[in-house]
Amino acid sequence: MSGTNNVAHSGAVYAVLSTPNDAAVGKRNFDRCATNEASELRAFFSGRIIVNKMEPISGAFKNRNWIVDLLAIFFGIGTWLGVNGTFIQLPLLVNEAPEGWSLPSYLSVMVQIGNLGPLLYTAFQKYSPWKLNDGWTIHAVLLIGTLSCLLTAFFYNKTASVMGSEHSVALFILTIFTALNACTSSVLFMPYMGRFKEQYMVTYFIGEGLSGLLPSVTALVQGIGNTGSCVLVNITETGQEIYEQVTQPPLFDTKVFFLILFGLMVLSYIGYTLLHALPLAKREYAQVTVSKGNKYVYGQDDNQPKVDQLSRGQYITLLLLIGTISLFSNGMFGSIQSFSSAPYGTKAYHLSATLSVIANPVACFLAMFLHFTSLRIIYVLSALAAILTSYVFTTAILSPYPPLYDQTIGVVLVVTAWTLVLGIVSYTKLGITTVMRAQGGQSLVWVGAITQLGSAIGAISIFFAINYTRFFQAADTSC
């Protein structure tokens, strides 16, 4: 937490106030105030039902500062940019890495080691008598992610001997630090955005979606998405034609790719610095009291939608729901997408991969106009996502011969399913986060922690399912 007159006292409790009556005040301080944690918990677990509501499109452009929106997007870009970029660059990395196509499995383990970041942060905030200043902690985490991208550009292909075998040790270590930035963002960046008005959580999520889209677009420009063409190279004595797949070299190499990511991380760092320091950004704080340990108690701003407290059952249900969604969307989808769509052809695979990445920020952008705090809508969207998830898992498990794999309708269905499931999942996660934000307390910290837990369980489970069972069989995409 930050303010112009922060006092370095143990156990300090800060208040962030921004209402229509004081919006003209240029200076924001975090002042001491008292909170009643017992009454806060009673409010959490009261039996009132949340308001079922969808905000009209006309309200999307009201009561917001577009500079703050832009800074929130830049801030969100710095979440998973490095991790997404590393995995998107795999088709080139495996050509130089001694691990070959086993490299993704090693990198997945390195990313899970990055979960030590949120675990250590949460444990320190809970058990240490000294609390970390969130503002400076975010500076440090973003700086780690930024430097990791820069160093990866120069050392990604440096190897070392480990137990008699050559391994991409530099890439492994740098991926751990890149993942540290990404994983910690769930329990640090998102709760930080809770001090702003509700609408800025949406633009933060747009930025988080762009952390996957921007590396994908960069890779497409680079030429990674080019599947090449089958060229006749020989005809045997028996008349059999021999083809080889020929691909064009990339427009620029892996070093340039990671330098581009470094530039985007610098942009994210600047965005956060301005978001944290500018008076116009501080004027967009919600009416909220923030106590130690990232506990939020919201007042009612007249310009913000009124949301009642959840019952205990609803609160736990939403946490379990976002954990389950994260288990599949963050932990498994990326690993099974090739098994699901590649049997339908390389075009189907690249279309599903590209459109599903685009679906994330597009869904968050739509949430600016179709913003909702309805549990009923969340449950309906979750049911639709479950149906689509069942379909893509079915096609993955039945690979290399999934339903309709040799028909155009099969291509249309699998590409549509992947695009819709990622879009609906992103929209639902944003809806759950918005509802949980309004509950105050440590709700956003819990959302981030459960998200990371679900993601880790999903990633580990699918790793063993793919590598140590016969459930998933890769389709033959050679000539």
Image (cartoon, rainbow, N blue to C red):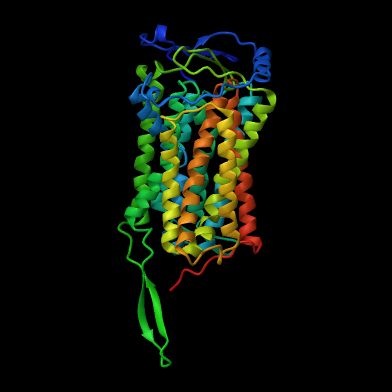
Q: State the image coordinates of residue 294 (x, y, percent, origin top left).
A: 57, 22
In the figure, 441 relative to 140: above or below?
above
Res 237 quadrant in image:
bottom left
**Residue sticking out furthest to the left:** 251
Q: State the image coordinates of residue 243 (x, y, percent, origin top left).
A: 39, 78
Please give the name of the residue rendered at 41% of the width and 10% of the height, measured from the top-left corner: 20
Res 362 quadrant in image:
top left
Q: State the image coordinates of residue 378 (x, y, percent, origin top left).
A: 57, 33
Please give the name of the residue rendered at 61% of the width and 55% of the height, measured from the top-left corner: 463
Q: Which quarter of the image is occupied by the C terminus?
A: bottom left
**Residue sticking out furthest to the top:** 21
In the figure, 226 relative to 447: above or below?
below
In the figure, 394 relative to 232: above or below?
above
Please give the name of the residue rendered at 41% of the width and 23% of the height, measured from the top-left corner: 276
**Residue sticking out furthest to the bottom:** 237
On the question of residue 264 being in view, the answer is: yes
Observer-nearest residue: 116 or 294?
Answer: 294
Q: State the image coordinates of residue 330 (x, y, percent, origin top left).
A: 55, 45
In the figure, 81 relative to 22: above or below?
below
Please give the name of the residue rendered at 42% of the width and 39% of the height, measured from the top-left corner: 361
On the question of residue 212 being in view, the answer is: no
Res 326 quadrant in image:
top right
